[in-house]
Amino acid sequence: MIKVKINGQEQSWDGDPDLPLLWFLRDEAGLTGTKFGCGQALCGACTVIVDKEAVRSCITSINDVAGREVTTIEGLHPNGDHPVQKAWRQVNVPQCGFCQAGQIMQAAALLMDNPKPSHDQIREAMSGNICRCGCYQRIENAVHLASTGV
Amino acid sequence: MNFIENPTKLRGFEKPIKVEKVSRRSILKGLGITGGFVLAAPVMSRQAFAYETGAGKMPHGVVVDPRVFVAIAPDGTVTILAHRAEMGTGVRTSLPLIVAEEMEADWAKVKVQQAHGDEVKFGNQDTDGSRSTRHYLMPMRQIGASARTMLEQAAAKRWGVPATEVKAVNHEVVHSATSRKLGFGELAADAAKESVPSIEGLKLKDPKDFRYLGKGQVGIVDLHDITTGKARYGADVRLPGMKYAVIARPPVTGGKLVSFDSDAALKVPGVEKVMQVRGWPWPSKFQPLGGVAVIARNTGAAIKGRDALKLTWDDGANGKYDSVAYRKELEEASRKPGLVVRQEGDADAALKGADKIIVGEYYLPHLAHVSMEPPVAVADVKGDKAEIWAPVQSPGGTREDVAKTLGIPEGNVTVNVTLLGGGFGRKSKCDFALEAALLSKELGAPVKVQWTREDDVRHDFLHTVSVERIEAGLDKSGKVVAWRHRSVAPSIASTFAAGAKHEAPFELGMGLVDMPFEIANISCENPEAAAFTRIGWFRSVSNIPRAFAVQSMVGEIAAATGRDQKETLLALIGSPRIVKPAVKDMWNYGEPLDSYPIDTARLRKVVELVAEKGEWGRQVPKGHGLGIAVHRSFVSYIATIVEVAVDDKGKLTVPRVDTAIDCGTYVNPERIASQIEGAAIMGLSLAKYGEISFKDGKVEQKNFDDFQVLRMDESPVVTNVYIVPPGPDTPPSGVGEPGVPPFAPALMNAIFAATGKRIRSLPLGKQLEA
C-alpha cells in the first residue's frame, strides 16, 4: 500500500506502483485540475509541487512520491488566493486556460525558491511550460506582479 | 505492488528544460509590465448598423429569441446562454456580455450557461472561421433589447403606465415620474408572459450609454475557475462507472489493421479489455480511423496496455507518402501553368516585356495544431440514446455525426460542450467523439477516449503543405507591372471527397485571388495537387502560406529596387479603393462584399498605424532588423512589424513586435489584444519550428520534442497591439485568426534586413546557422 499526502489529505494506492502520479491524481483521486499535455515532461501542463519542488507528474510514479507531500492546483490556497493566482487574474493571463494550472504551480515553486526573480529568471524558469495560445507575455508579467506584491 | 520508502532516484523531478540566456535591448529591461494595447477612440457611435453578414447563410442560420437565450430567476439572477464554444478567444464571455449590455443587466448578477449542441434551437454553433462576434454582435444585441423590452412592458403593466414612461437601468426598471422601481427578479414571471417584440421595432441602446461593450473591463467568466483548477475541460469529465480508453490507430492514413495480439496488454494491471474500433475508408470527412482500443480503470493503465499490444497494419495506398519527394512534385507543378483562377490584363505578355523579373518560391510544410488539450471525449450510449461530453468547436455538427455513426435519430443525441483546451481548428473535427460513442455502445458503459500527444501529432487533420510561386515583373522605374502567383497545395476538400485536386473557393479566397495590389496584369493559378493524408483547417488556414509568399515578395521587391519595405508595400497597395478581383465565385469568408469589401484604405491605414506606433525606420543595433507585413483575412486588416536580432552564430531572438488590427466594431478590446499577442507566438512558432513531415506514409514527429512550439524564453520580449477605432457603421470582423498570417513574412523581412539572407522555406530551423 502506497501512502501519499495530497493537499494535506492522506491517500493510499494498492494498484500498479509505476502508475504516473498524473493519472492517480486525475483518474483515481478525482483531482482533475492537473492536466495531461504530453506525457513526457515536455510541456509542464501536469506540474505539481512535491514538498517544495515543481515536478512533472506525468513521468513521476505514484511510488516516487510515497510518504511525500503533493500539492496540486486545488490545494495551492484554500480560496484560490495565492499571490500567483491573484496576479494571474489581475493580468487576465489565460486564453483557453488549459496549461494554466501547470504554469501557476511552476510559478509558485519559482517564487518559493526565488522570491524576487528578474524577468530573465522568470523566462528561464517558466520555459518548461508550454502555452499554445501564447500567453507568455502575460505570464511573465503576472509572475513579476506576484513577486512584487499583488 | 512495490513500496519504496526512500526512493533514491525520483523520475519526473527534473528542473525545467535548460535554456540559453536571451539578450534583449536594454531599453526594455526592467519594465514592470511589458506590452499592452491602445484604444484610440470609443466604438459604436451610432444607434444601429446598416450592414448584413453571412450569418443567415450558415447552416441553421441565426435564432434571435430571448426565450431561448435568457432566463431570469426570482432572485434576479440572469442566466444567459453561450451557444458558441470557448477555446480561448473569450467568446463565452463576449456574446453573453452583449446580451447583458442591451438588456441593462448588471454583469455581476449574470450567470453564463453553456448551450448543448442543438442548431435548430440555438442557430449555427460552429465556432470556426473567426465568425462568432462578426455574426452575433447584432443578434445578441437584439436578444438583449427584446428581453429589456419585455421587462419594461411587464413593469408598465404592473404600474398601469405607458411603456414609454419606463426604462430599464442596471437590473431594475424605473418609472422616474413616480420614483418607482422594480428589480428584474420581481418582474421575471410577468416579463416571461409578454410577447416577444418584433426585431424591426426594437430600440437598441445608444452606444454612448454602453457600460461594457468596447471597454475591455470585464474579465472572462472562467477566470477564477481556470486559476483554481475548477474549470472543466473535456478530459475532466467523470461519470460513475466510466472506463478509460486509448486507441492504437493505423500509422498511415487509410491503413488497416491486419492482426493484433492483446495477451501482454491484458496482463497490465488495471487493463480490463482490448477491442477493435471500427474505421472508415479514407477519405471519410471526420469518421474515425479505426484501430484497437485498450480499456482500463485509469488512463495510465490504458496507455501502458497499449504499449504492450502487438499490432500488424496494412499501410495501404498512402504508404509511400514522402515529404521530401512530394515537395519536389509541388515545386515542379508550380513552375508550369495551372488552372487560372484570376486573370486581369495579360500577365504573360507583361512578364515578357518586363525590365526585371523577381521570382520567389515559398514553401510551407504541414503543420499540426497541438492544442494543449489533446483530443478527448466522453460518451455514454444506452440503447438508442447517446450523450457526449467533449471539447468540440461544432457541437451541432458533432451531434449530427454521432447520430449518423450510431444510426440513431439526431434528437436522441445530446452533446455537452466542455471548455476547449485550445482548438485552432482541430476540434472542429469530431472524430474523437465518434470513437468514444462507438466504444461506449459496444461496452455498454460510459467511456472516455483520451488521445495522447503522440496520437495528436500523428493523426491530426493537418494544415496543408504548399508551394507558392510568385513572379513579379518590374518596369524600368521599378514599378510592378505583372504579377503571377501559382499556389499548389492539397485541398481540405480532399478530406471530404476522394480525388479533389484543386483548392476550393474558400481556400483560393484566402490571400490568392483576393490579393489587393494595384497591378495592371495579374494571373493567379492553381495547379493540381493530390492529398496523401488528412488535411484540415488550421487557424488562419491558407492565409498562412499566402501571406508568407506575397509579403515576402514585397520585401524582395523592396530589396531589388533599393526602396524602403513600407513604402514599397504602400506603393503596391496603391490608391485607396475597393478592390474587385475578376474572379468567378469570389469567396469573401462567407460575407457579402457590400458589407465587407476589400478596402485598400483600411489596408493602408493599418500599415500606417503600425508604422507610426511601432516606430518604423527607427535605428536598431547591429545584427537587428525590422520587417513589416500586412494581410487582410477573415475580413479584418492586420499589419505587423517584427524586430529581430540575429547573433553571429545565427541564433535568433525577437526583441519587439508591434501589430495594428482593424477588426471593425468590437466588443472586448482586452481579448483582442490577447488574441493578437498569442498570434505572434503562434506565428513565431510556425516560422521557427513548424514542420510535420512524412516518410513511408507515417508522420515522423511525435511530441513536443520533435514538433516544437515556442517557449517563453524565445517569445518576443514585448508585443504591442493597436486597435483601429471603427468607423460609425463598420461591421465587426474576425479576430481569432487574422493575427497569424502577417507574422512569418514580417519576421523573414526582418531577418533579411538584419542578415541579408532571404528565407523562402519554412520552418527557419537552422538556415541562419549555416
Image (cartoon, coloured by chain):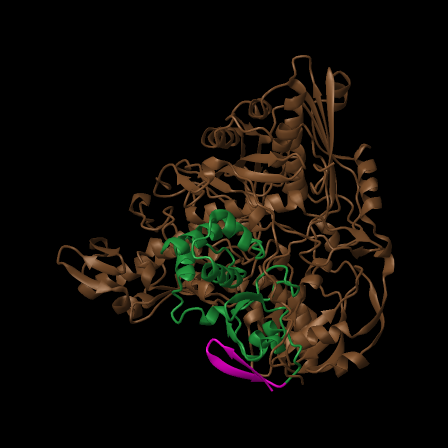
Chain colours: A green, B brown
* Residue B162 in the figure: left or right of residue A145: left
Does B180 sit above or below residue B585?
A: below
Where residue B409 appears, as percent x and y from the top left, is: 63, 72
Query: Is B128 contained in the magenta span?
Result: no
Given the current orientation, which residue lies at the most extreme top position? Answer: B476
Residue B78 x/y as whole percent: 35, 65
Query: Quick check: is A13 in the magenta stretch?
Result: yes
- Residue B365 placed where, x, y %? 73, 45
Would you identify the image quadrant in which residue A38 lies?
A: bottom right
| Residue B248 pos. (x, y %) | 75, 69
Up-down relation of residue B615 to residue B422 (above or below) = above
Residue shown at 67%/40% (left/top)? Answer: B545
Where, quadrant-wise, is the C terminus of chain B in this rendering? Answer: top right
Count of marks, rendered view: 0
Between B507 and B566, the residue placed more toward the observer is B566
Which residues lie in the magenta part? A1-14
Residue furthest to the left: B178
